[in-house]
Amino acid sequence: MSETILYDYWRSSASYRVRIALNMAGIDYTAVSVDLVNGEQRNDAYMDKNPQGLVPTLDIDGLRLTQSLAILDYLNTTRGLGLLPDEPAARAKVQAVAHAIALDIHPVCNLKVVSYAASLTDTPNETRTDWMRRFIGPGLEAVEAMLGRYNQTPFCCGDNPGLVDICLIPQLYNADRWGVDISHLPRILAVEQACASTPAFANAHPDMCKPD
């Protein structure tokens, strides 16, 4: 069997998602750091692997996969992770919560986006912080409301961690990093606590994956 290699960056939310899923699947992998801050994602060698110049990129099962949600779908399908309900209506509702995080909050807070926004001002550091808080805070408040449709369980939408949890926890790391107050979001706080005690999540945390 071919070696599984994850090209990632320790603080990347999308990479964080994939690390969680790989841990849930019990897949041993080699992590190769792509330093986004120093622009390694734009060098020729990496662009050959991922023409978008983004992380993560995953080499697995003789395949090269990009885009975290596509990778999660592949791992869920091939490793039976149970990240989504089987019933179509329930599946669509859970996906909507996950997409509210991964497709609405995350893209606008991407390093490339916020760096460009900050470059247009005379106060880039303040702009960067204000930008992150402006989009992460309201976005998580919407997710909290969406989670209100589910009975409170250890995880977002059930008794076991699923796609929403995998998308949420990396976003909470960013919220903490940028000083976003989530103290008024009890459902999200309860999920954060449950995931913190789950090895697949704890071992994927950026502090555990930061290069030496």
Image: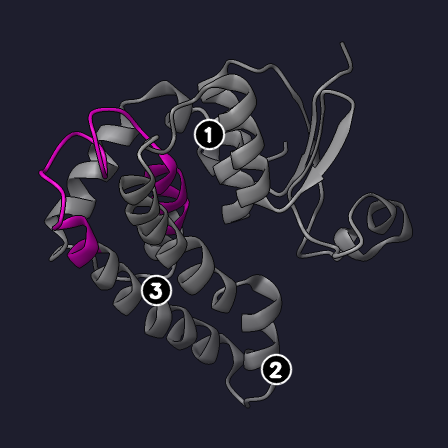
Residue at the (64%, 42%) spot, across then down: 56
Identify the element where label 1 is drawn.
helix
Amino acid carrying label 3: it is Ile
Identify whether 115 is placed above or below 16: below
Residue at the (63%, 31%) spot, across then down: 212
Q: Is-magenta flag for residue 27?
A: no
Residue nearest the observer in this picture, 105 or 36: 105
Label 3: which residue?
A: 136
Percent coordinates x, y for residue 168 in the rendering: 34, 46
* Label 2 or label 3, whichever comes before in sequence order: 2
Percent coordinates x, y for residue 143 in the rendering: 25, 56
Amino acid carrying label 1: it is Ile
The answer to whether 119 appears left or right of 190 in the picture is right
Percent coordinates x, y for residue 24 in the rendering: 44, 20
Label 1: which residue?
A: 20
Percent coordinates x, y for residue 15 in the rendering: 56, 41
Provide the residue span drawn in magenta. 144-172
Q: Specify the quadrant that holds the N terminus.
A: top right
Identify the element where label 3 is drawn.
helix
Labels 2 & 3 near each other (Cβ < 8 A): no
Marks 1/3: CA–CA distance:
21 Å
